Amino acid sequence: MRVALHTPLKAPDSPVPSGDREMARGLARLLRRLGHDVLMPAASRVAPGVPPPDAHLALERRARVQAARLIAHWKALPAHHPERFDLWFTYHCYYRKPDWLGPVVTRALGIPYVIAEASHAPRRAQGPTRLGHRAVERALAAADLVLTVNPRDVVGVKARLRPGARQAWLPPFIDTAPFAIPSRRDPTRPPLLLSVGMMRSRDKAESYRVLARALLSIREHSWRAMLVGDGPARPEIERLMAPLGERVLFAGARPHDELPALYAQSDLYLWPAINEAYGMAFLEAQAAGLPVVAGRTGGVPAVVADGITGLLTPIGDADAFAAAVVHLLDAPQDRARFAAAAAARMAARHDERAAAHALAAALKTLQGLPR
């Protein structure tokens, strides 16, 4: 099958690192692993970044023109032309970056429409976000199959699907193999606490604020910290961490293929996860055998098993977060137990092999659908 992979939020070839980019790349690998051809037609590309709500009306109008060109091109191709896709597959659809193209293109071409990771938030139905919200509702109403990655999206999405459409669970996944390398931790040095996250405004910056408050409150303990990431909020984050001096290393943004070595030399993975969907870095850290301390938010409990692979704390509570870190610093036996469980759990439940099996089963339900 030839699959048009549409990624409104972040394209797989984006130069900006993020969990969305890694998930888009992962879905392309899964589809190819299952024997499908993955196409990303030039006419289906959209501008990078998240536009302001007041731009959505113009974006919708532009998308209709874009869709018309894409439809005309598809129809002009011979029946078995390699650019003539059989299925439209959108990754990530939410009110700030909805799928304007999918519903129009699939209706005109009579092909199945799949969405992975959609969210529906009724509170966005009013005010400046209403146009993006309505676009999400149209996409969900047109979809034949929605693959839900974050458990908190299940109920909202289900309520908007048309009769006969299906919703299936796709576990958050990574290729665990690059992270399953021997530990490079140095037992003669203080434990290394690792955090990986872009340094941008809003939720990411707030996670760093919580992290800074937690680290400042445990200065009397022995530890070092490494922060991997960069972005416009870095000057603020550097100011927050300044009282900790050289105990906190700013490693900057690192290529994805360098991350396994950084996880391998660390002892704990820390991230407060303010409004995090589920967090790809949690999967990577645990695949590398790192215990996790995280905020209990969104889909994080679906990927970090509290008391088994890590500790979850109330969202935004720096004192509780700090207490969890101290517990694991003072309990090496718990760290070892969590580390072993984390690596095993990722390999069994969140590796690409498990996700490929779930995706194959879900796509089989598309066969024979009336159009």
Image (spheres, rainbow, N blue to C red):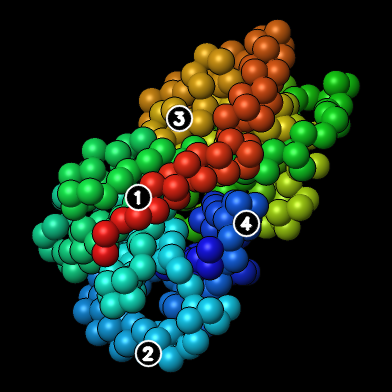
Residue positioned 83% across, 29% down in the render: 183
Q: Between disc 1 and disc 3, whose residue precedes?
A: 1
Kindly give the residue lying farthest to the left in the view shown: 126
Mark 4 or mark 2: whose residue is earlier in sequence: 4
Rendering coords of residue 208 (x, y %): 51, 44
Q: Which dot marks residue 72?
A: 2
Q: Residue at x 32, y 65 (%)?
A: 98
Kind of residue sitting beneath label 3: Ala
Q: Quadrant of residue 70?
A: bottom left
Give the number of the disc on residue 35. 4
Reply above or below: 122 against 338. Answer: below
Above or below: residue 354 compared with residue 325: below
At numbered mark 2, what does the secondary structure look like: helix, strand or loop? helix
Of residues 40 and 307, the one nearer the viewer is 40
Q: Earlier in the sequence, mark 2 or mark 1?
A: 2
The residue under the point 75% across, 39% down is 177
